Image: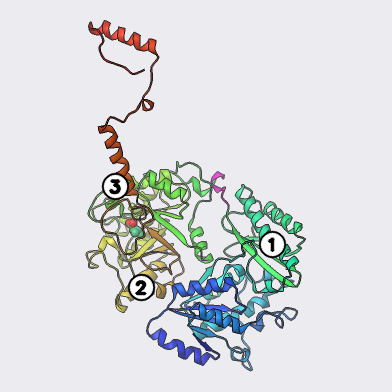
Amino acid sequence: MRTVRSVRELREMLAPERTKGRSIGLVPTMGAFHDGHLSLIRRARSECEVVVVSLFVNPRQFGPAEDLGSYPRDDARDLALAEAEGVDVLFAPPVDEVYPEGFDTTVTVGGLTSVLDGDPARRGPGHFAGVTTVVTKLFNMAAPDVAYFGQKDAQQALAVKKLVHDLDIPVRIQVCPIVRDPDGLALSSRNAYLDSEERRRALGLSRALQAAEETVASGTRDADAVIAAAQAELDKAGIVPEYLELRSASDLSEVDRVDGPTLLAVAARVGKARLIDNAVLRDNETSKEPNDMSSRPGANAPPAKRAAVTLSTLAEKRTLGEPIVMVTAYDYPSARVAESAEVDVALVGDSGAMTVLGYPSTVPVTLDELLTLAAAVRRGLSTPLLVGDMPFGSYEASNEEAIHNAQRFVKEAGCDAVKLERGGTSVERARAIIAAGIPVMGHVGLTPQTATTLGGYRSQGRTAERALSVAHDAMALQAAGCFAIVFEAIPSALTEAIMSRMRVPVVGIGAGPATDGQVLVFHDILGIHDGHAARFVKRYAGVRDEMIKGVAAFADDVRARRYPAPEHGYTMAPDEIERLHELLEEQTGEPFTGGFSL
Ligand code: KIV
């Protein structure tokens, strides 16, 4: 690990890495490392080739009455921990390197920085201006591909995401989950200020969040009731919050109900420490509401216990850095499994051509065949978003045909959206279908429908020129209005390079860990079919072996006359059997000689 103090040294270190095309991850910190920081560093280490950690206690985000002077610092310990985590560069500039004489520029994000901590009566918008100014500077200094922030500072993470979006800064913001001590206390450098009695009281914060979660889980969605449940826990701990508020998890706008992801944020002073904590609450009773998305047209599936996944849920998940889970489904049973496993998206993939219809590739499957599969999936699905895969030949010829066939997926099979493959002419088709009111998911990289043109079922974008063409396809589909894009079988480095330019959720299959979510084929996950599996497939069960075992055991039982046993048969009263014998004798004129078991 190299420790550098100046921007020049940092740039000199990173320039050759960038030229080699290596991905750079930045973890901005104010030091006093705890496991929360280390979780961000580990995430960066697992996703990026070069990891930079900045260690800078930023004076501009502290108010005059705040703890800048006493903020915990232990540079030697931080250095050792960073080294042990495999950090490549520790950037620890002095204050005048970041804010030289005459520095007079401030970057402010409007709106969401003026509530909660940004309320002038609390830390005020100046706090966030300090954060977004230093973060902008760090982005310009290190030019990372990905930057890592913790959900613990949820408002800060949202402000940074907005900053990057509004100023077109080419960096992907990865928000990582809150790390807690086993008793629930969220890790914070300021926990160091707590004595043991205060630490015990501070648990009231996480208990308040938990009480709110339980209240929502029990079906209550009214904001006042949820807040009251949380407040009761704070009262028990003798904590008077600076704020305890429910707000939209995507833009911090006010809410009066928990409908969709909702942030419950709390700040309170416990002893000398000002602590913050939060939880993203989700309504899981949505399916009982009359206008709930889970009662989508055509959905006959049993009522679900969680909220239906919508396009905004997926966008919010991306914003919050929560991975999106997508699986394929092709019939009622696989849909019920996807439902019970609480996946986010179910795709009636044209891979069904091979997995359930036995074709040698996806090319021969017809629209009618996929519609039959999609309608069966719809009957088993309540909450995951249902996407129908437009098969080869159903959208290429013209916008009119593409719109007509996409409408069939929605009207006849009850799909929420459709997916189509490739850039090129598919971009125009996607735009036309979206303009006709149907959401479209794009698909780039290995696009199996045109595998022959791509040189077979092989990974794509492995030279810089071909990688660029995959990137162009993805960006063109995004610009056309696709709500999400699948990246299939492309190098992880290519995914990382594209992700900072993506504004819509990206779901990967064989595209590395940097995407917003992952998709696998149902039969691959469960090991239902035999034969070759792609490199990216991870098998989570051996269902085919179990199925063969089960059917072979049935065959053995039948052949050995062990099945059916008496308990598998139906009985008749003895006098009814006797009468039946008499009737048979009467009608056939022959004595009854057969046997009936009683
Ligand atoms: O058809 C399919 O299964 C797919 C997924 C692999 C994304 O397109």
Q: Residue at x 40, y 66 (%)?
A: 480
Foreground residue among 310 and 150: 150
Q: Say which element carries label 3.
A: helix
Total marks placed: 3
Residue type, mark 3 in image: Glu
> Earlier along the polypeptide chain: callout 2 or callout 3?
3
Furthest residue in direction bottom, as rendered: 101
The residue beneath circle 1 is 203
Q: Is residue 277 left or right of residue 555?
A: right
Structural crowding at the residue carrying mark 2, measured as other residues with C-alpha within 10 Å and reported as few (<14), some (14–19) or many (≥20): some
The percent position of residue 327, horizontal first and vertical second, equals: 40, 55
Quarter holding ligand 1: bottom left
Colour mapping used in the image = rainbow
Q: Quadrant of residue 213?
A: bottom right
Residue type, mark 1 in image: Leu
> Earlier along the polypeptide chain: callout 3 or callout 1?
1
The residue beneath circle 2 is 472
Q: Quadrant of residue 265?
A: bottom right
Residue 580, placed above or below residue 405: above
Foreground residue among 311 and 30: 30
Q: Which residues are magenta?
A: 283-289
> Earlier along the polypeptide chain: callout 1 or callout 2?
1
Structural crowding at the residue carrying mark 1, measured as other residues with C-alpha within 10 Å and reported as few (<14), some (14–19) or many (≥20): some
The residue beneath circle 3 is 369
Q: Residue at x 29, y 16 (%)?
A: 595
Structural crowding at the residue carrying mark 3, measured as other residues with C-alpha within 10 Å and reported as few (<14), some (14–19) or many (≥20): some
Residue 347, placed above or below residue 583: below
Residue type, mark 2 in image: His
**Residue 514 visible from this viewpoint:** yes
